[in-house]
Amino acid sequence: MFERLSVAIITEELAPGEVLRDGELARGLGVSRTPVREALRRLTQLGMVEVVASRYTRVTEVDDQRIIDTLEYSGYQAGIALRMSIARMDDLQLAGAVERIDAVIAANAAGDEGAIFDTAREFVRYTTSLSGNVVFNGVMRETGVMVLRNLRSRRPTRRTQEQRDDGYREMRAALLARDADRAEAAFRRQHEL
C-alpha cells in the first residue's frame, strides 16, 4: 500500500494539496482502512503527507525549501554510500560503478536533465547496494521515494554543465583510484555542500 500511494504522489495522481481520506482511498484500492492508515503514517514521516488532527490529511507541496533540504540530505547520504561502497567493492563491482558514472557523464554532455537525474539516481542506488550496511540500505530505500518525489522535476543547481562534468569526472577518477575520501568530497561538491 505504501508503494502504491508513494507512486501516486510521485506521479501527481495524488496532487500536491489534495485532501486524502483513508476510507475513500481504501474503497478505491479495494483494501481495508488499516493498510491505508499505515501507509499514510509512513508518508507523513517522510514529509510527503501532512496531517492536521481532526481537520485534514493532504499531500504536501514541494516548495523551494523542501528541494534545498532534500538536495542537502541526498548529497550527504549518497556521499556516505559512495565512501562505504568503495571500501567493499570488488573489481567487477567497481567496473559497474564506473559504467554508471559514465552514463551520468554522457547524460550531462547531452544536456538532458531528466537523464542526468535518472542516471545519477541509478549510480547512487548501485553504490548504496554495495555499502554492505543493512541499516543504511534500509534507510536509503525508505527515504528514496521522498527524494524522488521532491527532486524529480525540480532540481535547481547553480553549477554549469562544465562544472558538473568536472565533478562527475572527479568522481570517476576517485572511483578508479579507490579513493573514498576524494569520491565523497567530489560528490558533496557536486551537491554544493
Image (spheres, rainbow, N blue to C red):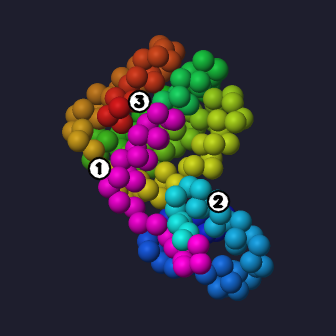
Q: Residue at x 56, y 21 (%)?
A: 86
Q: Residue at x 41, y 66 (%)?
A: 61
Q: Secondary structure at mark 2?
A: helix
In the figure, 127 relative to 21: above or below? above
Foreground residue among 52 and 36:
52
Q: In the rendered image, which residue does mark 3 sit on?
A: 187
Magenta-span inclusion, residue 63: yes
Instruction: Give the residues drawn in magenta, as a range.
Output: 53-78
**Type of the residue with mark 2:** Arg
The Cα atoms of the two marked residues, 3 and 1, are separated by 16 Å
Q: In the rendered image, which residue does mark 1 sit on?
A: 156
Circle 1 residues within 10 Å: few <14, some 14–19, many ≥20: few
Foreground residue among 97 and 4:
4
Percent position (x, y) of residue 24? 65, 85
In the figure, 39 relative to 186: above or below? below
Q: Quadrant of the N terminus?
A: bottom right
In the figure, 154 relative to 163: above or below? below
Q: Secondary structure at mark 3?
A: helix
Percent position (x, y) of residue 110? 29, 46
Q: In the rendered image, which residue does mark 2 sit on?
A: 42
Q: Secondary structure at mark 1?
A: loop
Left or right, 26 with respect to 161, comes to: right
Quadrant of the rendered structure where residue 95 is?
A: top right
Pointer 1 or 2: first along the chain: 2
The Cα atoms of the two marked residues, 1 and 2, are separated by 27 Å
